[in-house]
Amino acid sequence: MIFDSQTPLKVSIAATLASLVLVLVVFELIRSRRLQERYALLWLLTGMVLVVLSAWRGGLNTIAAWLGVRGYPPAVLFAVGLLFVILVLLHYSTVISRLSDQNVVLAQRLALLEERLARARDDR
Amino acid sequence: MSAELRRIAVVPAFNEDKNIARVVAELKEHDPGIDVVVVSDGSIDRTYEVARAAGARVLRLPFNLGIGGAVQTGFRYAWENGYDLAVRCDGDGQHIPAELPKVIAPVVAGDADIAIGSRFVSGGGYRSSATRRVGIRLLALAVSAIARQRVTDATSGFQALNRRALELFAADYPHDYPEVEGMVMTIKHRLRLVEVPVDMREREHGRSSITALRSIYYMVKVLIALFVGLFRRTVVPLGEA
């Protein structure tokens, strides 16, 4: 008979603390207006999911068993964390793409305006 | 040549103060009625001053956008200032102003919405490295297959556009290597595209912006763009011509 392995208490405490720090840092960044809410949502979600999974050992053990993770349930924490980091990065790539598109339009409009200004000055 | 069409040459230039004056002068020499707008793409040399002194209008981009962004600036200028025809002619001396009448002829005659100077339609005598020729041919084949229209040179930037084509490119134009995608976009928007044989030069001053590593990036980027483009709808609604 196979016993599903359990999450060690120390690991659970350390992971919970680390996740709480993440949530608090994100919260502080929003509070001091260094991070806009729209870009903080994914981070907050990441932090809270990790807090719950870290603190709730029974839940983590059960999910690990569902996923077929036999040896070491906290591995699920890594997987979940990694998944969210990938999501955040992908989100940022779309944000950068949009910003650079907008940047191009601004540069073009500026060039068109400057030319019009130069021509108006020449005509005077 | 039909004097009633308002024509403008769009000349993208990145640090071309050695070439640009001659390009501007030759364009005006071969088509006296044409206006010339140079797009200085974040140049840090005297391109702006030299081009203005040569009698061109100059759009000065505050930083380098790459060829697509630069050319689109010129197309937007042409569109917003009511030009009937715009022809792109690169400022590095590769495109020969003497060939300009050939490139604009089909658009002037109303036979095409966009006319592209091809190095490979019989009549052109372009020499280039074998690998580059193979790459250009492969892209032409890919475009031919996607567009269901035979093209021989999908990477030529020497092209003339009427207002319909200008409307499309002013609204939506690929950023860094625009020719291949631009070709597919025109055909997907049911614009009439023709190729005309032209001769092109090798560069005289400076180095081409396409080096070995970049050409790999170029092929990969363009192929991804083509493939993804297959799943994209035509986005720009064009007015009736």
Image: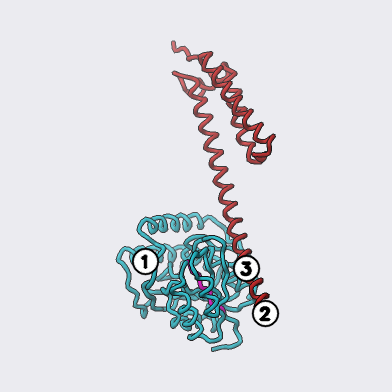
Chain colours: A red, B cyan
Q: Chain of mark 2?
A: A
Residue range highlighted in magenta:
B8-14
Q: Which residue is mark 2?
A: A123
Up the image or down, B98 lies above or below B62; here it is below
Whole-number angstrom distance, CA of label 3 to CA of label 2: 17 Å
Q: Main secondary structure of the magenta part?
A: strand
User: In this view of the protein, can residue B40 be seen by the observer?
Assistant: yes
Where residue B73 sits: x, y (%)?
Answer: 57, 67
Q: Nearer the viewer, mark 1 or mark 2?
A: 2
- Hey, what amino acid is under mark 2? Asp
Q: Nearer the viewer, mark 3 or mark 2?
A: 2
Whole-number angstrom distance, CA of label 1 to CA of label 2: 48 Å
Where residue A49 sits: x, y (%)?
Answer: 60, 27
Whole-number angstrom distance, CA of label 3 to CA of label 1: 36 Å
Q: Nearer the viewer, mark 3 or mark 1?
A: 3
Q: Which residue is mark 3?
A: A112
